[in-house]
Image (tube, rainbow, N blue to C red):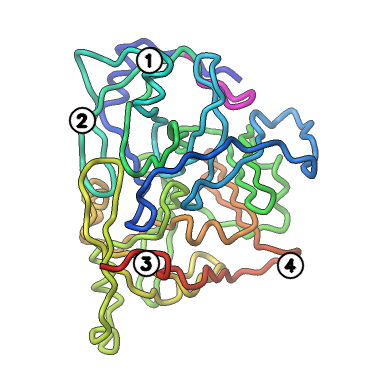
């Protein structure tokens, strides 16, 4: 399916601000070369006319979803599927390999977890993932530890009225016109709040504290702001020393993070236990105007433990299925802080 092209002037206006909220931590900040996923003979062929893109996927070395993407007919290249990005991006290495020219007169503002930066952009004739095609688009050129060796980021928050399925149990990603194609009769359905910055945000509770929770497949771990940390502190927790780590985002800034075990996280009828959340004074919460409101980002440490995650961007609904046939509504990520480098 082709998306209509925009004029360069319109594209520059639309690209003034880009949000990339993926984050890495000290233990996962070094890049790694990854092979493209190979088609699995165990996966059934898709014949539904509503499916625009279906591809085997793999995980990068920190557990995020990577899919093959074609740029101007070349590739495939490794792109991270990121529900926390409102635009797709491209790496400088891929720009050089394809001989693309960056913008000379203007740049875009990139807001990441840890800070803000200016980035040049390139115009590409076509970005293609299966039959899902975007013609005549511009991509900010971003290199940062958050890329972790990938060739770019596929910003799922820019899918508009499409639907996204990430099937972790079968290592498969689908983009479709409607969520019916995913068959979510056994899934937990959670309705999202009105969209902010094109992102999926849910009404959640951490312990007894109401929290705004953003779903982000581009983040290695779950994060919380200082307002949330202050709200959930108890006399017992005040005497427990926290682990300290470094947090890397889409810009050069590196922030200090404080790792603490979270109280039970409740989202709709779903309970999430045993999560180590990284708290800090992160820039992106200020961009969203949430630095004084308890808020968090749900990363791949939690999302990667479920069987599948479907997002209906048009109706602002998400569907989560647990591992196994039963409709389990409690997910246990396990001891997460063991893989974070202590400082």
Q: CA distance from mark 2 to mark 4?
A: 48 Å
Q: CA distance from mark 1 to mark 4?
A: 47 Å
Q: CA distance from mark 2 to mark 3?
A: 29 Å
Find residue 142 and report its horizontal and vertical position in percent: 32, 31
Q: CA distance from mark 4 to mark 3?
A: 28 Å
Q: Residue tagged by mark 3?
A: 277
Which range is magenta?
Answer: 127-135
Q: Residue tagged by mark 1?
A: 123
Q: Quadrant of the C terminus?
A: bottom left
Q: Residue tagged by mark 4?
A: 326
Q: Residue tagged by mark 2?
A: 118
Residues under numbered marks 1 and 3 in contact, where contact means CB atoms less than 8 Å apart: no
- For mark 2, give the secondary structure: strand
Within 10 Å of disc 4 (Cα), the crowding (few <14, some 14-19, many 20+) is few
Q: Say whether residue 316 is left or right of residue 263.
A: right
- Looking at the image, is mark 1 or mark 4 earlier in the sequence? 1
Query: 176 and 54: which one is in front?
Result: 54
Q: Quadrant of the N terminus?
A: top right
Considering only vertical position in the picture, is 193 above or below 155?
Answer: below
Residue 48, picture quadrant: top right
Look at the magenta stretch and give its main secondary structure. strand
Query: 29 and 86: which one is in front?
Result: 29
Q: Residue at x 42, y 38 (%)?
A: 149
Within 10 Å of disc 1 (Cα), the crowding (few <14, some 14-19, many 20+) is some
Find residue 280 and report its horizontal and vertical position in percent: 24, 62
């Amino acid at each position: 399916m082709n998306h209509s092209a925009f004029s360069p002037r319109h594209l520059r206006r639309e690209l003034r601000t880009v949000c990339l909220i993926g984050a890495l931590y000290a233990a996962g900040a070094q890049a790694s070369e990854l092979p493209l996923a190979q088609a699995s003979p165990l996966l059934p062929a898709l014949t539904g006319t509503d499916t625009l893109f279906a591809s085997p996927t793999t995980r990068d070395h920190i557990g995020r979803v990577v899919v093959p993407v074609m740029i101007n007919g070349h590739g495939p290249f490794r792109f991270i599927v990121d529900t926390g990005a409102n635009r797709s991006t491209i790496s400088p290495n891929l720009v050089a390999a394809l001989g693309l020219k960056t913008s000379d007169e203007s740049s875009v503002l990139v807001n990441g977890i840890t800070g803000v930066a200016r980035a040049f952009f390139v115009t590409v004739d076509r970005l293609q993932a299966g039959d899902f095609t975007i013609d005549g688009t511009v991509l900010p050129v971003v290199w940062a530890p958050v890329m972790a060796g990938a060739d770019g980021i596929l910003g799922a928050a820019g899918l508009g009225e499409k639907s996204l399925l990430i099937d972790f149990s079968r290592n498969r990603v689908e983009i479709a016109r409607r969520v019916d194609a995913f068959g979510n009769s056994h899934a937990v359905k959670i309705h999202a709040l009105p969209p902010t910055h094109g992102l999926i945000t849910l009404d959640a509770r951490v312990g007894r504290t109401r929290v705004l929770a953003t779903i982000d497949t581009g983040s290695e771990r779950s994060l919380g702001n200082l307002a949330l940390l202050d709200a959930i502190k108890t006399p017992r927790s005040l005497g427990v020393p926290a682990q300290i780590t470094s947090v890397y985002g889409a810009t050069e800034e590196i922030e200090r993070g404080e790792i603490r075990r979270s109280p039970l996280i409740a989202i709709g009828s779903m309970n999430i236990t045993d999560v180590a959340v990284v708290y800090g004074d992160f820039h992106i919460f200020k961009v969203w105007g949430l630095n004084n409101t308890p808020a968090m980002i749900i990363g791949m440490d939690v999302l990667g433990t479920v069987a599948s995650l479907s997002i209906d961007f048009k109706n602002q609904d998400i569907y989560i299925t647990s591992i196994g046939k039963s409709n389990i509504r409690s997910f246990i990520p396990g001891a997460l802080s063991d893989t974070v480098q202590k400082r």
